[in-house]
Image (cartoon, helix red, strand yellow):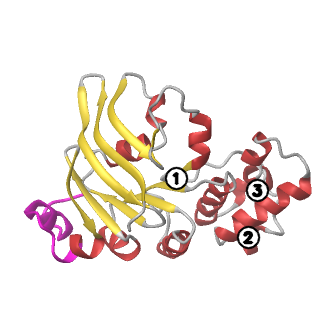
Amino acid sequence: MKEIKINISNLNLFYGNKSVLKNINLEIRGKKITALIGPSGCGKTSLLRSINRMNDYIPGCRIEGRVEIDSENIFEKDVDVYNLRQKVGIVSQKPNLFPKSIFDNLAFVPRLKGIKKREDLLEIVEIAATKSAIWDEIKDRLSEPALNLSMGQQQRVCIARTLAASPEILLMDEPTTSLDPVSTSKIEQLIYELKNDFTIVIVTHIMQQAGRISDFTAFMYDGEIVEYNSTTKIFTKPAVKKTEDYVTGRFGN
């Protein structure tokens, strides 16, 4: 029986009077990679940010409908948003490290949780950095400024910082946009390996990337989900002509 980790139903999102998401219904399976694809401005990032309520920060944003994680609606008034964002981590397009040491970046959330002993923090840092395939590159540089790292290394440290919060779900908003091909390949391999432990939702405008790493793909257009299916079917036998036109490059990103 399929395990549904995230169940989005009848979701509508507005910025002021502008309708951005229109009646989104989507079941996202646990410990799988789901890609959100579609042209710029179609609502991919707005949908992603709805899953951990990051849209709460946008003035005039209004949401209707439900997003259930483990059958609990995250928009209920009694939901602890801080705990939600620990459970549902997000990695942005560009590395957004703090102007602190590599260690202080990775220990940031554990310290917020009250962990003080350096040996305890170091254990968490090592585990998170190992899962993010960056430990061997930083283990002798933990006291250095994180911003001294290459862009690809910084992005993997950002992923490690997210993992240090012990999430169950990883949201990734075009995480390789600012990276070179070698770093992109490393991040893609990392994402593919992380699905063994995490439910991953990734926004990407790179069709080949969605095809390489995702299990399921949702094609969005003008705030709606046009088609959602296994990635293989979306890219080889789409049911909707508009999906076929998009994935074959007949209209742009």
Residue segment shown in magenta = 235-253
Mark pair 3, 1: CA separation:
17 Å
Q: Which of the marked residues, 1 or 2, is nearer the chain's N terminus?
A: 1
Residue depicted at 73% across the width and 50% down the height: 105
Label number found at residue 102: 3
> Which residue in the structure is indicated by mark 1?
94
Mark pair 1, 2: CA separation:
20 Å
Residue depicted at 42% across the width and 59% down the height: 202
Q: Residue furthest front?
A: 1
Characterize the local packing of mark 2: few (<14), some (14-19) or many (20 or more) Cα atoms within 10 angstroms. Answer: many
- Amino acid at dot 2: Trp
> For residue 63, what is the image quadrant?
top left
- Amino acid at dot 3: Ile
Characterize the local packing of mark 1: few (<14), some (14-19) or many (20 or more) Cα atoms within 10 angstroms. Answer: some
Q: Classify residue 156 as left or right of residue 222.
A: right
* Number of numbered discs on residues: 3
For residue 24, above or below residue 166: above
